[in-house]
Amino acid sequence: MDSMLLDIEKLNVTIDTAAGPLKAVQNVSLRVAKGETFCIVGESGCGKSITALSLMGLMPKRAKRRAERMMFDGTDMTTLGESGMRRLRGNRISMIFQEPMTSLNPVFTIGQQLTDVMRAHSRVSLAEARERAAFLLNKVGITNARERLGQFPHELSGGLRQRVMIAMALMCSPDLMIADEPTTALDVTIQAELLRLLRDLQQEFEMGLVLITHDLGIVSRIADRIAVMYAGQIVEDGTADEIFGNPLHPYTQGLIACIPSPDHPRMQHLPSIPGTVPPLIGGLKGCHFRERCPYAMPSCMEEIELKGHEAAHRYRCILPAQTSAAHAKMAQGEQVHA
Amino acid sequence: MPEVVLNVSNISHFYRAASGFWGRRSVRALDDVSLKIHRGEIVGIVGESGSGKTTISKIMMGLLTPTSGTVELDGRSISEQSRRDIARRIQFVFQDPYASLNPRQSIGRIISQPLKVHGIGTSVEQAKAAREALDVVGLSSRIFDAYPNQLSGGQRQRVAIARALILKPDILICDEPTSALDVSVQSQVLNLLLDLRKEFDLTYVMVSHNLSVIEHMASRVAVMYLGRIVELNVSEAIFSAPVHPYTKLLLDSAMTVAPGAGIPDMRITEELRENLRQHPPAITSFTPA
Ligand SMILES: Nc1ncnc2c1ncn2[C@@H]1O[C@H](COP(=O)(O)OP(=O)(O)OP(=O)(O)O)[C@@H](O)[C@H]1O
Ligand code: SF4
Ligand SMILES: [Mg+2]
């Protein structure tokens, strides 16, 4: 495990709210290797973004973080303090957010913003920084890179701004990139182009990539490993082949079944997961998915641990793997023959 | 053959851009768009952002007057019909269930609002109708006095649908009705739309950039590119044998679930763009089943 870039063990984040403590992240463990694409999926409000932010020491107000281990490339991040984390963030870990307009400063030119992030963390001349900025804009597929450096964010389309964000995140050649829904707001054609780009750059620079998205189509195509989050917990994780080929948690099975596809008879009901993610205030007892699970039984009220082999496939459900696998097959059969 | 309920012919529309560095420019949003919608159809409109999808939906609802061309509702030009008359026939559901509901109004008020505006019924009757509408969209009438911020995205979208249905329209225009929702909730809302259509004999126009949703829901599909309909045909044909290069590009770039398939290789070159612009539209008019 020492070759791991990111090694997080039992991360917990609790937010103090007016209604009581909200357990946004509970015992989340994840490991990301160099050059690996690790995807976090799950419905809105399951804790994906808070997980990502707290990894980088960027917690919402009134949030407390606790973890058994938080290692980045051999460094214990819990000992780093605020300034140490800031250095790490600009330098070796980068983050891309969903909304490019809110992450770019409207009053500075693209060039100023790109060079600033680099010069804040390393001793390079302005000329060198501009050189790298132009090089990266070119890399992310922006033509006339040099002219773009003098433009303001509002002069660019959504797709171009998102490219600038990627270029900005790459300015310091990070070892790890955390991307939270980086392409959700974009058109399908641009989305495909940008993801391919991210993927190429990642391979070229051997960068680890943590991609957060609720788009299972994207995940199925690019993930090496996947963690499925539900109501603050990882309910299933493993290799992409395992998660898509043999999903064992009823939640994962439900998510995959809901996606409209030609396997479903047209203009007929799609499978759905009844209900919504429960509020996380006060903490939930037993299996968090219980109220929406078609297989729930009294023993699901007990605390349920992740079981299976960490390297290959784990899931948090009381059902034996054979039973779950049979459910998955059945669900698939129903879709095809309904 | 089912009658044409909405007849859009030769619509062009220019937006006046704000005056800027280059002086006043106008942007052509629609270029000679024609589309007939028949009773009971679900017509899907797909295309990239800026291709004119939302503009054409606004024009269909009479919310925007096109620069040229006509829209007929039941054979009469909508420019001759009052907003009120149109509203009783055509309603809409927008993409963002967060932005489209007034945060300061209770759910009951939001849903009964159109009845108030149209002066239909007493306030007791209006409240009763709103409770019934909640039931129709699968929400508990307990949320009658709740406010939008107390509801989930899926619930808010159901509220928006309830509000759209309260005047008993026969055409619903849905602009990205599920794109702000999770897949699990998306399928709940799509199932609801399918049920409502059967129950109330509705005709839908569904705008979406999610091709899988359109493939599942639509009976016919219009593909828009740069303000024009570049391909129009029954859904099966569009998805199994696309003709226009832009339709092909859209289908190729869709990221359907395909483990290990990688990301489609979209190299959008100048040459391809030129080809997309030059290629003649492939329009197949409606043929009754
Ligand atoms: N600043 C905050 N204060 C209080 N609660 C918060 C705050 N930010 C998030 N939460 C709550 O924490 C939980 C997890 O939120 P998070 O944003 O991580 O979800 P997510 O999985 O990223 O969702 P999405 O897919 O919508 O981005 C939710 O219950 C959310 O309402
Ligand atoms: S533990 Fe029980 S309720 Fe939870 S997912 Fe498994 S079967 Fe369903
Ligand atoms: Mg998030």
Image (cartoon, grey):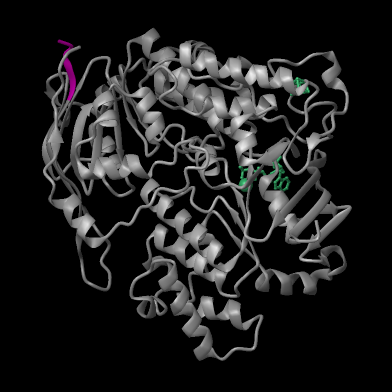
Residue at left offset 51%, top offset 43%: A221
Residue at left offset 82%, top offset 20%: A300
- The magenta span reads B1-6
Residue A20: x %, y % from top left = 84, 40
Which residue is outermost to the top? B199
In the rendered image, residue B170 lying in the magenta stretch gets the answer: no
Residue A206: x %, y % from top left = 60, 65
In the rendered image, residue B3 lying in the magenta stretch gets the answer: yes
Q: Quadrant of the N terminus of chain A?
A: bottom right
Q: Nearer the viewer, residue A49 or A133?
A: A133
Residue at left offset 38%, top offset 76%: A145
Res. B15 in view: yes
From the viewer's perspective, is B239 left or right of A73?
Answer: left
When the figure is inspected, residue B76 is found, relative to residue A24, above or below; the finding is: above
From the viewer's perspective, is B114 left or right of B20?
Answer: right
Res. B127 in view: no
Residue A287 image-quadrant placement: top right
From the viewer's perspective, is A125 left or right of A249?
Answer: left
